[in-house]
Amino acid sequence: MKHLPVMYAEALEQLAIKKEGIYVDCTFGRGGHSQGILSRLNDSGRLLAMDRDLVAIDSEAAQTLLKDKRFKLRHCCFSELESVVADEGWTGKVEGILLDLGVSSPQLDDPERGFSFLRDGPLDMRMARHVGLSAEQWLAQVTEKDLAKVLFEYGEERFARRIARAVIESRAKTPITTTRQLADLVENSLPFREKHKHPATRTFQAIRIEINRELDELKEALQQSVRVLKPGGRLVVISFHSLEDRMVKQFIRSESGAKFDPGKLPVKEADISKGMLKKIGKAIKAGDREIGQNPRARSAVMRVAERV
């Protein structure tokens, strides 16, 4: 296995792996993190990995690791974290959970998946192929108003309305079926081009997040993590854009402080419930050496919390 995921060493360090512990890798990808976790476990340790991409499940890396009796792999979304862990009888026993968000390099590099505007291919963008609407199907039916909203909220695209209008006008003449079509359409609809950023970057991000329900998936997994972890267990999340990172940051903050019912005044100590997590350190970013070897690491942010 030659593939090493972003912030590999940092993830393993922050998980604070115990040799006999139970761990969950919610985003298997090509197994880089999973292989690292397994290498630090003894015969009693266990690792459960998950991925909704069947290509990852069927990969050579997965088939190799499945020969290890300590390892299990489930084809599912990470929003199913709690139920999958419950199936193993591990609820409240997990020492560490890892979430490496976003699109993996193998997904980006495959033109047939439609994730990248740098490679011409079918406009798909689904993490789980053949499940739900493809980007092509979604663009063929979305209203101009809803498209502009998605581009603005999920892509933080300042020209969301302009792009949405261009898409609707273009599809009335010719179906938008390829990544090159969409990328060219976006580029031609913008008044200027930013330095060091492709004009279609935010549009592709926004559409991908929408059709894969990425933020909803993340919200559900985060909420379930506190019920899965044992006291002292670690939650490690690597995000690649501001919307994900903001959600992770706010979740850890909300679960770290004392809480009380504002409807019960005056507030008594018995009415105050403590948070389920405590923040561990500050946000961690990839080092210059890793960024030099893998430019994708530039936007990576890691946040860590511990179950109390």
Image (cartoon, grey):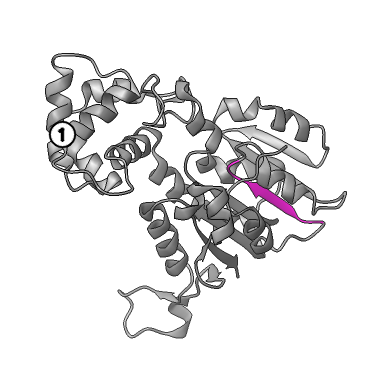
Q: Quadrant of the C terminus?
A: bottom right
Query: How many discs mark residues in the rendered view?
Result: 1
Is 23 in the magenta? yes
Is 246 in the magenta? no
Q: Nearer the viewer, residue 245 or 111?
A: 111
Residue 177's spot in the image, x, y percent?
A: 30, 17
Residue 282's spot in the image, x, y percent?
A: 51, 71
Q: Which residues are magenta?
A: 20-27
Q: Is residue 92 visible to the viewer in this orientation of the structure?
A: no
Q: Is residue 167 above or below residue 95?
A: above
Identity of the residue drawn at 64% across and 46% down: 25
Q: Is residue 70 above or below residue 236?
A: above
- Horizontal arrangement in the rendering, residue 238 relative to residue 19 (left or right): left
Q: Nearer the viewer, residue 30 or 218?
A: 30
The quadrant holding residue 4 is top right
View extreme (top): residue:
174
